Image (spheres, rainbow, N blue to C red):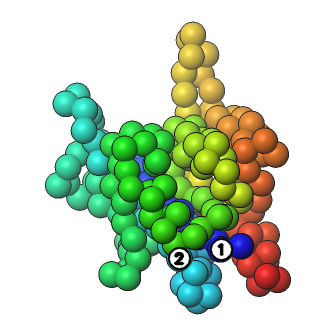
Amino acid sequence: MKIALLLIDVQNDYFPGGKMELEGMKQASDNAAALLSEFRQRQLPVVHIQHIAAQPDATFFLPDTPGADIHQSVAPLASETVIRKNYPNSFRNTTLLAHLKEQQISHLVIAGMMTHMCIDSSTRAACDLEFSIKLASDACATRALTFADVHISASDVQNTYLASLNGSFAEVLSTQKIMAGLASE
């Protein structure tokens, strides 16, 4: 088994003052940083995913803006892979699958943003591609949504998406449980 950390869209526009602020970013980014530190200490592969908006009407992650930059809490080292994407699914029209296959990665730990978009679609795609996945529940963040004039809190969105991914697409665990599992391998 070869494992890698996949950090998805931990970018400035999701943080306070950004163009698409998410709820719970501080805790989620602290946990993502803890996972990153653990993977670095164990000299395990890390892949950073960076979303760059390609749609002409996009309002955040605009090319060549500070908001699209990866946040300093998980800033990539020169030796770590950064893959840019233009869609929620990190595998769509990117080199991610080829990179993971080249590195003989079969297991992924996934963390990042937005749970109901890029985390959900990337986790489901990784499962379809037969990766074994651990999703760090507390190293992800999202925002409130509205549907048919009903307000859905960020907490409800987060819990619903994590619950729907757990078991069928990934093993959803806390950062601490994932790190404890790394220590026992």
Number of marks in the image?
A: 2
Front-lying residue, 24 or 94: 94
Residue beneath the point at 59% across and 68% down: 105
Q: Which residue is mark 2?
A: 45
Give the structural element (helix, strand or loop) at label 1: loop
Check disc 2 and give the amino acid type. Pro
Asked whether, in this view, residue 40 is left or right of residue 166, the answer is: left
In the displayed structure, would residue 31 be above or below residue 93? below
Q: Is residue 18 visible?
A: no
Q: Cβ–Cβ below 8 Å for labels 1 and 2? A: yes
Q: Where is residue 176? Give x, y as percent.
A: 75, 72
Check disc 1 and give the amino acid type. Lys
Q: Where is residue 47? Give x, y as percent.
A: 47, 67
Residue beneath the point at 73% across and 50% down: 170
Q: Where is residue 131? Give x, y as percent.
A: 66, 55
Q: Is residue 66 visible?
A: yes
Q: Which residue is mark 1?
A: 2
Callout 2: 10 Å neighbours few (<14), some, many (20+)? Answer: many
Figure quadrant of residue 128: top right
